[in-house]
Amino acid sequence: MSDNAQEVNYVKPADHQKFVQDVLCANGVSRENATIISNCLLQADLRGVDTHGANRIPTYIERIRNKILDPAATPVLTQVTPVAASVDAKNGFGFVAAHLAMTRAIDMAKEFGIGMVSVKHSNHYGMAAWMVQQAVDANMMSLVFTNSSAAQPVWGGRTKTMGVSPLACGAPGGTPERPFILDMAPSVAARGKVYKALRRGEKIPLDWALDKEGRPTDDPAKALEGVMLPMGGPKGSALSIMMDVFSGVLSGSAFAGHVGGPYDFTKPADVGHFLVAIKPDLFMSLDDFRSRMEYLYQKVVTSEKMPEVDRIYFPGEIELLNKEKRLKEGVPFTLTEIKNMNKEAELAGVEKMKYT
């Protein structure tokens, strides 16, 4: 183990999950819910989405300490129609509410072909792809929306108004190893990447954000004081508004810039989500659907490549390759990141995260 704070160290998946579960349980989360949360955070780290993995634990626990997130909350599900339901997260962990919501959406889709669940009064649910994967594992297509705290301007504006809320969707592939999973923010880069750069003392590309004076910046601290830039100009801005309509307005949660930020410890987040599960064999057999997905996959990855491009990937494929690698090698963290997480273990009186 090196004293170099930025040198990479590796954590075994089992040690990763145990650490997260122990810290959460010591802070009032039930073992059942801690298992759901720890699995979601591990899946993010395994897929290489380091911005939404175990590094989020200190922030989540700080929200609990400030009594703006209820660790013991039990989400309440209300059936509205045969194909629509609502979940009140009761200001608990977004992972738990979203897991319940997707489970119910899948059950409705199995019976009726489609299931929709709106979630209100929730919190951050991490990487959206884990819910898409939950649907894929049940042979379902899915749409996963959420809103988030203000971080970027609407097109033509200069102040934070909309969140960089990710949209995600997916479908079973020709084989279990090749599903279609799309999970992306409507900004040039996810805000979590800026926080990661700040945490690691790194600079960011100049086209990610503007400082509070409206100038391009490579300083993550100044970027967080300013605004994130939408991808594709007005198109990314419009997608952010769409996320707010379907997740915030529809659910009854905060919207229009009023969602609490992940590092604002003065008020509940009041995040909204919207999840849809769709049965892929509504109009043909599942075998035919998978065959058509395999054809699409092959058409994409065997496309004629541009100069200097070694390989073309299907959406979600790079993350699955990361997962294969990290399951073998472990999850990489800098020593600084491990120390920050282990501070929570010390405060909670549980075993620290093991690493090599």
Image (cartoon, helix red, strand yellow):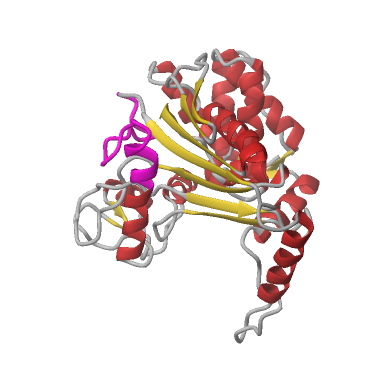
Which quarter shows the C terminus? top right
Of 313 and 285, which appears nearest the observer? 285
Q: How many marks?
A: 0
Of 260 and 292, which appears nearest the observer? 292
- Residue 267: % across, % down: 31, 24
Image quarter of residue 277? top right
Of 252 and 344, which appears nearest the observer? 252
- Which residue appears at 72% of the width and 57% of the height? 321
Boundaries of the magenta span:
243-266
Q: Main secondary structure of the magenta part?
A: loop
Query: On the rendered structure, is 340 left or right of 279?
Result: left
User: Can residue 71 be seen in this snapshot?
Assistant: yes
- Which residue appears at 48% of the width and 47% of the height? 196
- Residue 223: % across, % down: 32, 52
Query: On the rendered structure, is 145 left or right of 213?
Result: right
- Which residue appears at 75% of the width and 54% of the height? 286
Determine if the magenta segment contains residue 262: yes
User: Can residue 41 be seen in this snapshot?
Assistant: no
Determine if the magenta segment contains residue 99: no
Which quarter shows the N terminus? top right
Of 192 and 338, which appears nearest the observer? 192
Query: On the rendered structure, is 161 left or right of 18?
Result: left
- Residue 155: % across, % down: 24, 60
- Residue 207: % across, % down: 36, 65
Q: Is residue 300 above or below residue 209?
A: below
